[in-house]
Amino acid sequence: GDSVTQMEGPVTLSEEAFLTINCTYTATGYPSLFWYVQYPGEGLQLLLKATKADDKGSNKGFEATYRKETTSFHLEKGSVQVSDSAVYFCALSENTDKLIFGTGTRLQVFP
Amino acid sequence: EAGVAQSPRYKIIEKRQSVAFWCNPISGHATLYWYQQILGQGPKLLIQFQNNGVVDDSQLPKDRFSAERLKGVDSTLKIQPAKLEDSAVYLCASSLDREDEQYFGPGTRLTVT
């Protein structure tokens, strides 16, 4: 079945450092790909998405590119802030509204 | 615009007891989802409603879990009887329609002792 694999956390960075959180997927077709973020005490929020190969999703300085050849959708940000500290979930949806999530990666940013 | 509301935020019960969670989706959203998020794992879909009808409940443990969405607005998720492995955060989400962006509530953290 379809699945999503994320790098384990926590990822610990200093403010203004470069961020990469790896995400790879397994799917039988051509899924849409998503990154969700969960700030402490809050619900999941959609951060960005991409619906087809080579699409780049971007929001709040975060970017991810849909790479069909490597079945990847890595999340990047050039300069993280303390306020980016949260748990990040990669997810896919294959021609349905059913989301399949990865296990999440906790990001901790220190001043 | 008000977000997805859930209550209670926290619940502690003993195994074999019953518990119910409530969700109020964003006004006008036709699709409602219940997810289970066990510690260290990603959310897993339990059941999906379209208005007051069930679209997908393939991963709902129907021997102990039940859910309803009367009148196609609010929804309740019930566990009876609870087991230790039901300890998790239960998330409710809603979307305008199927395949639209899902908006999540803050969740209910259930601890079964």
Image (tube, rainbow, N blue to C red):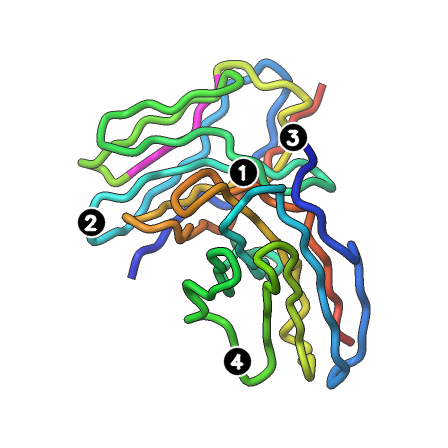
Q: CB of mark 1 within 8 Å of CB of mark 3?
A: no
* Residue at image point 60% right, 60% down: B71
Label 2 amino acid? Gly
User: Mark 2 Cα within 10 Å, few/some/many (few <14, many 20+)?
Assistant: few
Mark 1 belongs to chain: A
Q: Which residue is mark 4?
A: B62
Q: Which residues are magenta?
A: A72-77
Q: Secondary structure at mark 2?
A: loop
Closer mark to the observer between disc 2 and disc 4: 4
Q: Which residue type carries mark 4?
A: Lys
Q: Amino acid at mark 1?
A: Tyr
Residue A85 numbered tag: 3
Q: CA distance from mark 1 to mark 3?
A: 9 Å
Q: Which residue is mark 2?
A: A29
Q: Are marks 4 and 1 on the same chain?
A: no
* Location of mark 1 (residue): A88
Q: Which chain does tag 4 point to?
A: B
Q: Is residue A73 magenta?
A: yes
Q: Residue at x 65, y 30 (%)?
A: A85
